[in-house]
Image (tube, rainbow, N blue to C red):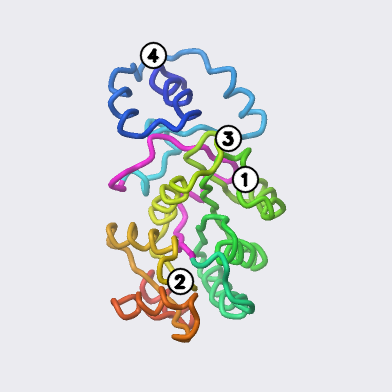
Amino acid sequence: MWTERKKWLFEASHSYSNRRHMLEEIVKKDNSECIKTPSLYKEYEKQEIVFITQSDEEYPEAFREMYDPPLYFYAKGNLTLLRKKMIAIVGARQCNKGIDRLMQPIIKQLVIEDIGIVSGLAKGIDTHAHRITLIEKGHTIAVLGSGMYRLYPQENALLYNYMLRKELVISEYAPPISARKWTFVERNRLVSALSQGVWVVEAAEKSGSLITVDYALDEGKSIFATPGSPLNKQAVGCNRLLQEGAILVISADDILRELT
């Protein structure tokens, strides 16, 4: 059902308006009277892209429990995955060769235990996480830092299109909106919210994936990290997390003990 409030949110989502401004304006909008569906949304509907607000039944409970929940988001794919137990897998974009050999057996066991994988469809660890999950016939959610018409990185187009058909892709940004540096930061909070915990596979000292860790810590969730050589720059962030109390991961059991 479309209300004045939902229509206003839909229109506002096509700009970079900040959430504080939206919160100030939304209280002025009526949320009870049904109005005509916006014509632009009908174009999205043809592509099976849905617009979900906090008043919709599809809005996940995990978002309602957040400190800074999205007012709305766009989704395409299997919406039931929003209620599935998930582990977030994040890490370096420039990850080391052979990282699949570490990730594959762990993800395989998580899939066997009916745990899904949520990540950001970025280069590197994110891509490996989604791809291995699909190979193992598991379920995965991609949270974009851009709108669905502005995929970044483009090299993931094949993986992205498959996930649109078989899994779930969501974004806080309207389909025509391009990514900005800060949209990836905001995206990370949704990755954390949909998960039961965050596994950092590889991360440099100032890796953006550590922002996801910060969100997860604020939510009281488990943090997992895989150690690496002190000589490996892409392991510095993980080693630091382990020093600070993250759970060391060398097998799926290290994660499963915390999630079950």
CA gap, disc 1 to disc 3?
Answer: 9 Å
User: What's the mark number on residue 175?
Assistant: 3
Instruction: Tell me how far mark 2 sits from mark 1, CA to CA.
Output: 25 Å
Span of residues in magenta: 65-90
Pick whichever, 89 or 147, lies toward us.
147
Q: Is residue 84 magenta?
A: yes
Mark sitting earlier along the chain (2/3)? 3
Q: Nearer the viewer, mark 2 or mark 1?
A: 2
Above or below, comparing residue 149 to residue 1 in the picture: below
Residue designated by label 4: 33
Disc 2 + disc 1, Cβ < 8 Å: no
> Is residue 21 or residue 169 the one in the foreground?
21
Query: Disc 1 or disc 4, which is closer to the eye?
Result: 1
Q: Nearer the viewer, mark 4 or mark 3?
A: 3
Q: Quadrant of residue 24?
A: top left
Q: What residue would you read off at disc 2?
A: 204
Q: Quadrant of residue 48?
A: top right
- Sequence order check: which comes first, mark 1 or mark 3? 1
Mark 2 or 4, which is nearer the eye? 2
Q: Residues within 10 Å of mark 2 (few under 14, many from 20)?
A: many
